Amino acid sequence: MALEKTADGVPTIYHVAQRAGVSIATVSRVLNGHEQIRPETEEKVLSAVRELGFVPNASAQGLSKGLKRIIGLVFANSWWEEDPQSVEENSLLFADELIRGAQVAADRHAYSLLLLSSGVTHRGHAFSDVFGKVDALVLLDRVVRQERVGPIAKRVPVVLLAGSGRSRSATTIRVDNAGGMQALAEHLVVVHEMRRTAFLGGLVDSPDNDARLAAFQQAVFDLGGSCEIDEALSADWTSSGAVAAVGRRLRKRRRLPEVIACANDQMAIGAMHALAMAGLRVPEDVAVVGFDDIPVARYLRPPLTTVRQPIRQLGAAAVDSLVLRLQGHEPARDVVLPTELVVRGSCGCPAVPDLGLGNGNGSTPRGERA
Amino acid sequence: MALEKTADGVPTIYHVAQRAGVSIATVSRVLNGHEQIRPETEEKVLSAVRELGFVPNASAQGLSKGLKRIIGLVFANSWWEEDPQSVEENSLLFADELIRGAQVAADRHAYSLLLLSSGVTHRGHAFSDVFGKVDALVLLDRVVRQERVGPIAKRVPVVLLAGSGRSRSATTIRVDNAGGMQALAEHLVVVHEMRRTAFLGGLVDSPDNDARLAAFQQAVFDLGGSCEIDEALSADWTSSGAVAAVGRRLRKRRRLPEVIACANDQMAIGAMHALAMAGLRVPEDVAVVGFDDIPVARYLRPPLTTVRQPIRQLGAAAVDSLVLRLQGHEPARDVVLPTELVVRGSCGCPAVPDLGLGNGNGSTPRGERA
DNA sequence: TTGTACGCGTTATCAG
DNA sequence: CTGATAACGCGTACAA
């Protein structure tokens, strides 16, 4: 009669029931906070749970309820590549911040985050395998081709992150790249009266890169300036790539632009480094601006003028949206989070003493929700 | 007779079996690569799977096999805190790098990573809940108190990360803090002939901080130098905290040390910033060195001399160890990964031109496996 | 208020 | 080589 302990020593709901002298149904009710339970019964169950250290098996719960309470976060596989050559600093802090935001939100809804990489990695493990492990998916920019989103979204709720624009098959959440770049261009052309700008882009197939480039270029044009897009001035989102790119550009001995606008802060760091090594002063000889506002930006010399994007909120919004869907609601299909111009010293503005206390400084919030 | 599609439209093994005209047992066999299956039967099953887009339900697999193929990565909850005040840049890239390493390893073993925070966050969600969702756990430094490790390790295989030392209840994997600090101290005292050093520490209850401080101090002493540990010179691992700490120290108007050794690179960045703002030159007036070798370290001015720790390998080693345990093996109980001194300019060495191509430069590998 | 019994989707152990 | 069928642990109608 006495129920044996499980082989691995993990107690089940049956052990709890037996110990409390009730049925498993009652245990389940108590654990799930159902009403209509005699207090003394509840107490018996609770202490049995405590004494046994019982924890419900998530697999069984998932199977029974049809909900795993797990949301998958899918990164492009290049992020995880082992190749030591491609150190892939690519928006390094991006992943970190994004995960934090998503984690907070998931936590709030009692969900967990499962980390996944996009590609087929090993014999027999296809991307589609993940459908069986999660209730919903967050797909980062560039993890799957546009046409593959549809089929995936048919299987599980999906949000696309950091994409350039809307997708008809899935919810999209992104930051206002265009607004940020407009504010930046305005600052450079109007305040600093710069006319000849250049754009140092990231990987070309990235929606974020495309959006930033297009918006910056257009804004500069509209204000009467020009924007050089030298084929040499193109990197892979990394600092080292930017160092090389700027090096290539310098070797051309063509007249330099007044400012180099970089598609992210990592590359801005590399650009500043390359310029310094060439004996050029930033911002006196060439100004440099970035995009992201990574924590170290304010500690660079000069402090980096950049566009802040709310990465954490991005992650949180993605999870919130998915949880809403899982609860049967119909959240906004296209969300755009505001960006903010952060003016520091690298654009030519006088660097204000920054004690690392406040946020940064100047600000021009942009963006709206759709 | 015809099997209806599931409510949510997700096909099960029964649908596949029906479509292929076989039993679910056969389908399972095919999918799990069992031998002794007639090729033509296998083909029928495989095409049925393809046509239906069948993906096995992980919950059911987990329940049936008693293995979820999920490893939990537990971060201290402060990492995820929403409090915008505590921007918590704390070893920002640490988490990122660690996760990457773990992800690669998990992927290799066909496991997934579940992200978890340590604290009780909401009504009814206790930390112990995670036992039900994972097969094993990676606990980061400071996520649980020493005495809580035992009970946890009794439930699931556990590895402790970045801890100061061994734990009798769980496997420990860490980096050779001591070796790195010894090499650093040697470089400062012997090469640069410094005598008066200072240590800018992180949070005091952190094993990593304690280990680095103790090793540095000891090494400097042994070489005939002194190490100032001013109560003012203590921060929270963040750049802004370091800025404030160095500010406090400067206001004391006591004679400054020749070098400030920081417990991580983030703080070194803050220290350099604070010194620059006070009109002091690095390294001429005060040298600054760090620990970690985060990507941006080489692009600072001057480039940061620091100790590199193999964070990715740390994550990978943790996962590898757990998978071994889950497979019934008995991996090493205490693993120490080597660290490496990376000499750049902030210690007073002539900064070599760095095109961002190589690794950094000078090196003194340390550490061994136990 | 509580207990019985079935279903959730897979794997695995038997027979055949 | 293949097909029934019993677990796996939990939630929940349905009965009592």
Image (tube, coloured by chain):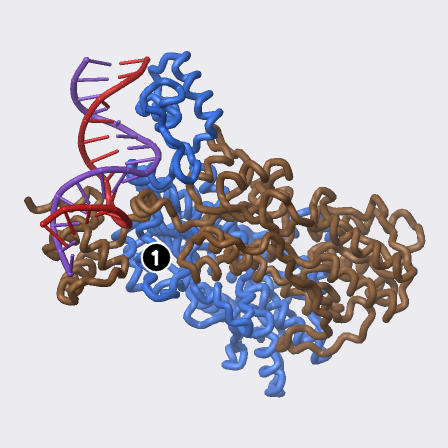
Chain colours: A blue, B brown, C red, D purple
| Residue at 20%, 62% in the rendered image | B36
| Residue at 61%, 66% in the rendered image | A289
Q: Is B117 or B367 nearer to us in this picture?
A: B367
Establish if B152 lies above or below B36.
above
| Quadrant in the rendering for residue B343 | bottom right
* Tag 1 residue: A166
Q: Amino acid at mark 1?
A: Arg
| Residue at 86%, 59% in the rendered image | B220
Q: Is A23 or A214 nearer to us in this picture?
A: A23
**Dividing the image into 4 quarters, which one contains the N terminus of chain B?**
top left
Report if residue B341 is visible in the image. Answer: yes
- Measured as percent of width and height from the top left, residue B301 is found at 74, 68
In the rendered structure, the answer to whether residue A120 lies left or right of residue A247 reads left
Kind of element beneath mark 1: loop
Q: Is B123 or A133 nearer to us in this picture?
A: A133
Disc 1 chain ID: A
Looking at the rendered structure, the number of numbered marks drawn on it comes to 1
- Measured as percent of width and height from the top left, residue B19 is found at 12, 55
- Measured as percent of width and height from the top left, residue B216 is found at 80, 56
In the rendered structure, the answer to whether residue A36 lies left or right of residue B70 reads left
| Quadrant in the rendering for residue B64 | top left
Report if residue B293 is visible in the image. Answer: no
| Residue at 86%, 67% in the rendered image | B284
Q: Residues within 10 Å of mark 1 (few under 14, many from 20)?
A: some
- Measured as percent of width and height from the top left, residue B354 is found at 68, 77
**Dividing the image into 4 quarters, which one contains the C terminus of chain B?**
bottom right
The residue sitting at the left extreme is B1
Establish if A358 lies above or below D12.
below
